[in-house]
Amino acid sequence: MQTHISFIIKTCFFHLRRIASIRRYLTPDACVKLVVSLIFSRLDYCNSLLAGLTASSIHGLQRVQNAAARLVLKKRK
């Protein structure tokens, strides 16, 4: 399962970097739609299988979610 989680994290951060590079040209609504469709849809896919995992396994997915929220809201860490 750790391999699957690592792949999800890797692809989500790839898409976040790509969205961040065009963020200044997007409206806030368009940015939200991109993040939901590209990031949160990947995080939600088969999330019932992630229910019993340890906190350290899920920590990377939480980092992706936090980075996506910062991107949409234009906030820093």
Image (tube, rainbow, N blue to C red):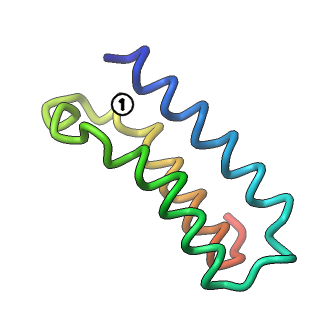
In the rendered image, the vertical position of residue 39 relative to residue 70, given as above or below: above
Query: Where is residue 59 drawn, in percent x and y?
Result: 41, 39
The quarter in which the C terminus is drawn is: bottom right
- In the figure, is residue 40 to the left or right of 72? left
In the rendered image, the vertical position of residue 23 relative to residue 29, given as above or below: above
Query: Where is residue 69 drawn, in percent x and y?
Result: 55, 68
- In the figure, is residue 68 to the left or right of 21? left
The residue under the point 60% across, 57% down is: 67
* The image quarter in which residue 11 lies: top right
Looking at the rendered structure, the number of numbered marks drawn on it comes to 1
Query: Where is residue 16 drawn, in percent x and y?
Result: 67, 52
Other-residue count near label 1 (Cα within 10 Å), few / some / many at <14 / 14–19 / ≥20: few
Query: Where is residue 45 drawn, in percent x and y?
Result: 31, 42
The residue under the point 84% across, 64% down is: 22
The residue under the point 48% across, 32% down is: 8
Residue of label 1: 56
Q: Amino acid at mark 1?
A: Ser
The quarter in which the N terminus is drawn is: top left
Find numbered disc 1 in the image and state the secondary structure of the residue it sits on. Answer: helix
